[in-house]
Amino acid sequence: MEGRPQRQQGRSLQPGGAGGGMRRGLAHALIGIALLVALWHLASLGAAANPRTAAFAGLAPGPAFAALLAMLGGGELWRAIQPSLIRIGQGLAWAVALGVPTGIAIGHFKTLEALTHLPFQFLRMISPLAWMPVAVMAFATWDGAIVFLIAAAAIWPVTFATAAGLRKLYPQWFKVARNLGAGPRHVLVTLIVPAIATDILTGIRLALGVAWIVLVPAEFLGVTSGLGYAINDARDTLSYDKLAAMVIIIGIIGFGLDAVCLGLIRRFSWRRTA
């Protein structure tokens, strides 16, 4: 018994510790990025050496980063990013507003879960982009159609993650709450929502990834703004350096949004590890 605290103390006093782990993680990340850029550069050299693909030389890292800096300085980049972020925000808001109550309902009522399982699984497997003609006819504006497509893609991860989180709760918790006089609203607000907040946020994180993928082809519709429009315009004008720059920006923003979701999951998680 006396040796165990000593061993634990010895581990905590080892040089490096958490700081060393962070430095190693950062080093690995930088090495991974460097390898990715190196492969990108080699692929661009191969494309430039081939007469059939020499026109795509602008996709190389050098021209791409030069175009990115020029777009940052001229404000063009923000004009492309802002509409896309607004559409993503609106689509996710609708997905959460509809998906969380639906997930709570099917996670709580087994009969409802049985009734909706096959229809929901069928609808989930339909590509959101397949609804594009329907969205164009149903909504008066292109923005409305794009928001609908994003919501159609994002609602299923939110719904199923919420339902799965509710199923994992101990039934005894509900008995204790009822014995203490809690009504349905109090059970929902003080028990269910805090207990499954991590699962809801996990569903939102997954939904964000799907929605971010759907956003670009959805913005190929009749809009004249957004990241998807910028990529389509760069392709039509053969500005491959700008196209590659927009691809970089899409990856950076998507990574940042995912990091925000991951931080919220860790912040609101009630499952603590020793």
Image (tube, rainbow, N blue to C red):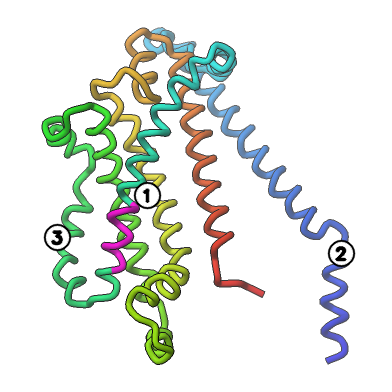
Q: Residue 249: x, y in percent?
A: 50, 27
Marks 1 and 2, how far apart at CA: 41 Å
Q: Does residue 137 sit above or below 152 in this rendering?
A: above
**Which numbered dot is residue 14?**
2
Query: 26 or 135, which lies in front?
Result: 135
Instruction: Give the spatial CA distance, label 3 vs label 1.
Output: 19 Å
Judging by the rendered image, the residue that carries numbered circle 1 is: 207
Q: Tags 3 and 1 in contact by the CB under 8 Å rule?
A: no
Q: Element type at marker 3? A: helix
Judge the density around disc 3: few (<14), some (14-19), many (≥20) Cα neighbours within 10 Å.
few
Q: Residue at x 18, y 72 (%)?
A: 112
Query: Which kind of residue does numbered mark 2 sit on?
Result: Gln
Secondary element at tag 1: helix
- Looking at the image, is 236 positioned above or below residue 18? above
- Magenta residues span 96-104
Q: Residue at x 45, y 57 (%)?
A: 201
* Number of numbered markers: 3
Return the x and y of residue 151 as percentages of the image width and height: 28, 44
Amino acid at dot 3: Pro
Above/below status of 232 relative to 120: above
Badge 1, how many Cα within 10 Å: few under 14, some, many 20+? many
First of labels 2, 3 by sequence position: 2
The earlier-in-sequence mark between 1 and 2 is: 2
Quarter residue 184 falls in? bottom left
Query: Residue 193 location in percent, x, y?
Result: 42, 68
The image quadrant of residue 4 is bottom right
